[in-house]
Amino acid sequence: MKKTVDMTKGSPFKLLLFFSLPIALGFVLQQLYSLGDSFIVSLSLGHNAVTGVNVTGSMTFMVLGFAQGISAGFGIVLAQYVGSKDEHNMRKTVGSAILLTVIITAILSVITVILSRPLLALLETHEDFIDHADSYIKTIFAGLVFTTLYNLSDQIMRAMGDSKTPVLILILCAILNLGLNSLLFIFPSLTVAWAGWATVISQGISAIVGFIVIFKKFPVLRLKLHHFRLKFRFCMKLLAMGLPMAIQFVITASGCMIQQRAFNILPDPNYAMAQGTAGKIDNIFGMVLNGCGAAMATYAGQNYGAKNYNRLRQGLKAGLLVGLIYTAFSTIGAISLAIPLTYLLLPSAPSVVFTYSQQYLTIQGICYYFLFALFLFRQALQAVGKSSLTILGGIVELVLRIFVSFTFAIWFGFDGACISNPLAWLGGALCFIFLFIAVAKKFPHADYNVRVGEEKTLASSSSNEV
C-alpha cells in the first residue's frame, strides 16, 4: 500500500506542522479564488451584485458545510482503516462513500434550490441585494453534487496521508474558476449566476481529476463493482461518523445565518455590505487555522485506528503549540490587510464601509486562538469516533451567537454584533476541550504496540524459566 505520510511514527509536532501546511495553503487558495470571484463580479457587475454574492456566505456555509461534514466523516473512517492497515475495508469505505455522497447531495440540492429565496427573505436580505443573492446561490446549490465529490476526493487523499496533491488540484480548480469568471467581462449578457456556474464547473472537473489521481496513486483503493454495493451496517457506520459532523455544521451555520440577520437589520445597509465583505476576508485567515485542525483529523484517526493512544495525546499537545504559529500569522494578516482587501473587493464603496470592515476584522483577529482551539479539539473528537459529541459544542456556539448577536447589537450596535463570533468560538472551544478530556480518560495508558511488546516479553521470559 502506497502512503505519503504515516502519522503513527515520528515527531508529532513536525508531522502536524508540515502536514498541515499544504492543507492550510489549500484552504487559503480556496478562499482567495472565492475572493477573486468577488473581485471580478464587483468590477463587471457592480458593488450591489458582489454584495449579493457575499451575503449568501452563511447560507452557503450551512448547505456546503452539511455536505462537507458528511465527506469529512467518511474520510475519518478511512483514516482509521489506514491506521489499522485494513485494506479490504478501505476499499469498501471509498466505494460506499462515493455512492452515499451522490445520493445525499442530490436530494439536498433539490431542496435547497427550492428554498433559497424564502431563506434569503427570512434573513431580511436588503432589497438592493436579494435578486443577485438568489441568482448566485441557486446555481451553487444546483451543482452541489459536483462540489461535494470534489471535497470527498480531497478527504480521501488526506486520509491516505497525502496533503500535497489536493493543493495542486486546487490550483487547477482556481485557474479554471477565474478563467470562466473572466467571461463576465467578455459577454455583457451574463449575470451573477455565471459566477456560481463557474465555481460548479471548475470543481466538477477537479473532482474528476482528483479521483483519477487517487486510483492511480493508491492501487489499494482501485475499486471493483462489488465495492459499490451499499450494505446497511457499513453504511450506518459511515453515516454514524458523517451525519453528526454534518449536523454540527448546520447548527453552527444556523447561528451564522441568524448573526447575518442581525447585521441585515441594522439601520445602515453599509453595515451589511462591510460585514459581508469582511466575512470573506475573515474566512481566509480562519481557514489557515483550520489547516491544523484538518491535519489533526488525519493524525488522530490514524493513531486511533492503530491504538496508539499516548501518541494521540502527545499530538494534541503538539497541535496547541503549532496553533501559536498559525494564530500569530492569521491575526497579523487579518488586521493589517483589512482595508486593502476590502478596497480590492469594493473599490467604489462609501468610505465608512472600510472603517466598519476594519472594526470587524480587528475584533475577530485578536480572538483567533479561540477559533483554533475549537477546530483542533473538534477534529480530535471526530477522529476518535465521538463525532456525535461535537453536536453539543455546536449547540453552545449557536446559543452564544444568537444571544450575543442580537442583545449586543441592540445595546452596542455594529461593534456588539461583531463580538458574537469570538464569544461563540470561546464557548465551543471550552466545550470540546472538556469533552475530549472526558473521552481521553477512558483510553488505555499504554499504546497497543507497547502492550503487545510487553506481553511477548513476558511470554518469552516465562518460557525461558520453564
Image (cartoon, rainbow, N blue to C red):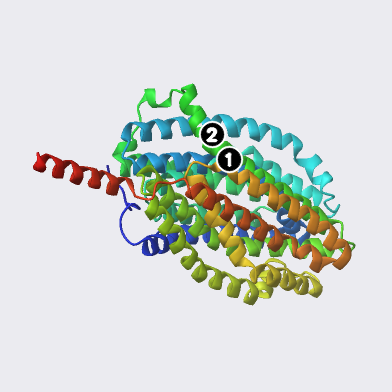
Q: Could you tell me which secondary element the residue under label 2 belongs to?
A: helix
Q: Could you tell me which secondary element the residue under label 1 belongs to?
A: helix
Q: Can residue 140 be seen by looking at this rendering?
A: no
Residue 97 — which label? none
- Name the residue type under label 2: Ala
Which residue corresponds to the image point at 80% horizontal and 66% vertical from the top-left?
416
Query: Picture coordinates of residue 300 (x, y %)?
Result: 43, 50
Query: Picture coordinates of residue 451 (x, y %)?
Result: 29, 46
Could you tell me if the residues under marks 2 and 1 are in contact, i.e. CB atoms within 8 Å? yes
Mark before the other along the chain sequence, 2 or 1: 2
> Left or right: 177 with respect to 417?
left
- Name the residue type under label 1: Ser
Image-quadrant location for residue 119: top right
How many numbered circles are shown? 2
Q: Nearer the viewer, residue 427 or 187?
A: 427
Residue that numbered label 2 is attached to: 240
